[in-house]
Image (cartoon, rainbow, N blue to C red):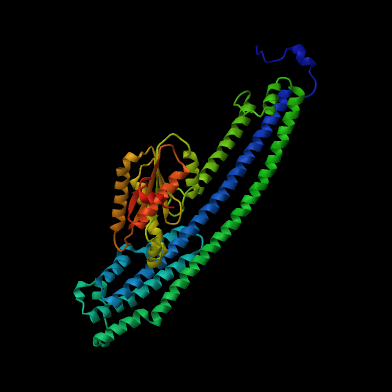
Amino acid sequence: MNENRPADNKESTLKGLRIQSLSLWMVGATIVVSLLIGSGIGDAMRHHRDLADMTQKYILTQNNVKDLLMGTDYLTEQSRFYVVTGDCGYAEAYFREANVDRRRDGALEKIRNNLQGHDDNVLRMSEEALDLSNELMDLEIHAMKLAALAFGEDIDGLAPEIRDYSLTEEEIALSVQEKSQAAFRLIFGPEYSGEKRKIEEKLEGVSESAIAICSAQQVASETGMRSALIRQGVYTVLIVLLVVLSYIMIAVLILRPIRIYVNCIKNNHVLDITGAYEFKYFAATYNNVYEMSMEQQDVLRRKAECDALTGLLNRQAFEQLKQQLHGISMPIALLLIDVDVFKSINDTYGHEVGDQALIKVAQLLSQSFRTADYVLRIGGDEFAVVMEKMQSEKKQIISDKIDKINWELQHPVGDFPKYSVSVGAAFSENGYEDEIFRQADRALYHTKENGRCGYTFYNPDEEWAGLT
């Protein structure tokens, strides 16, 4: 016999609502509302995902438009350099871009993949921009053929496109100076500039259309999310009503058996996964939501601590790391790193090359130091490395790493400019202290004042260490 079943004489004396029947109704209602909440959450997540996907496609499309334009500009630049200087290296770079790297074709294919099915007009304008760029190539090759003849180049040694390009008899009969002038007119003249403007206008149209598509998707997603949130509000109210009704039922019918739960709530104890199924379900759901919330906060915190350009930890992460290492019984080393003549790189080669220079330094630092070390970007061209369990006796390890990094920076691949880094290092036996930063900064100042491209380890006995 089931011991939980009341005796017949007691059952016959019960009046009013039966807790078993009411509990079944409450459980059924709770399940229905929970499913609605889950459906609402899924709907909101779907709209959010659609918005995020479209935004990502927009960003990629804008980058692809830039790549297409950069590819066109690069061809213009190399052909003009060749016409001006006669340096065959520019012609080789021109056809390597046109036939091997093919940035323009790759960019168009990516635009087609990103916006397929959204707006055929965008794809048409992108294809027209590439067609116009290909038409420009005819003028560029024409100009390079004339320039090659004007410079007296061995035509057979040039690219097949230049070698096989046919000139008119009148052009062949021109003098050296006239051929050079004709080449200049072709590639610097108004016809060429007009075609370039058409390409830019087409690509501006692609960007504007991508913005319109993204905006429309944003409106649709925001509307859907707003509707989902309203429904979630209604479901939340229903949950509150069910909880209140459950509390009234429990308070009236089973107050004494659950007094322990009331005491737990009054004492603000954490909910344990215990008791009946309904209580376990409530506690598990609450704990799951809490864990999800903590995970989301952790993801947001990691994003906030990451430098967008280099992927390294940023200044905010550095401040938190200082607090984390403050006062601990552990030897650490602090390296402060400046990119030498970084302003000159920006002014001479442009901010894009400057960004690439910073990225290169970040990569070399990450590759050179241990995975347990903290590599951070704490300013524009300022980096820092925090090494745990690192004592001053191991200076040679650090100096070897800095020498290797500077060697890499001083021997770049291709046309990338040479540059270097200056480093100041200091050590502490008791974790992070404010003094270690000042010491590393003084050491860095000494490096920069003594020729840059090197390192200095702080030594209080050195004369320069007293500088402020």
Image coords of residue 266 (percent x, y): 70, 28
Residue 182 shown left or right of residue 265 in the figure: left
Image coords of residue 11 (percent x, y): 76, 15
**Residue 424 visible in rendering:** yes
- Which residue is depicted at the point 67% across and 32% down? 28
Of the pair 88 and 432, the residue shown nearer to us: 432
Of the pair 125 and 290, the residue shown nearer to us: 290
Is residue 362 placed above or below 39 in the rendered structure? below
Image coords of residue 263 (percent x, y): 69, 24
Residue 210 shown left or right of residue 335 in the figure: right
- Which residue is depicted at the point 45% across and 57% down? 380
Of the pair 193 and 321, the residue shown nearer to us: 321
Residue 180 shown left or right of residue 18 in the figure: left
Q: In which quadrant of the rendered view does residue 12 lie?
A: top right
Is residue 281 placed above or below 435 in the rendered structure? above
- Which residue is depicted at the point 71% across and 38% down? 238
Q: In which quadrant of the rendered view does residue 397 lie?
A: top left
Is residue 263 placed above or below 44 in the rendered structure? above
Of the pair 134 and 287, the residue shown nearer to us: 287
**Residue 258 visible in rendering:** no
Q: Quadrant of the N terminus?
A: top right
Image coords of residue 312 (percent x, y): 43, 49
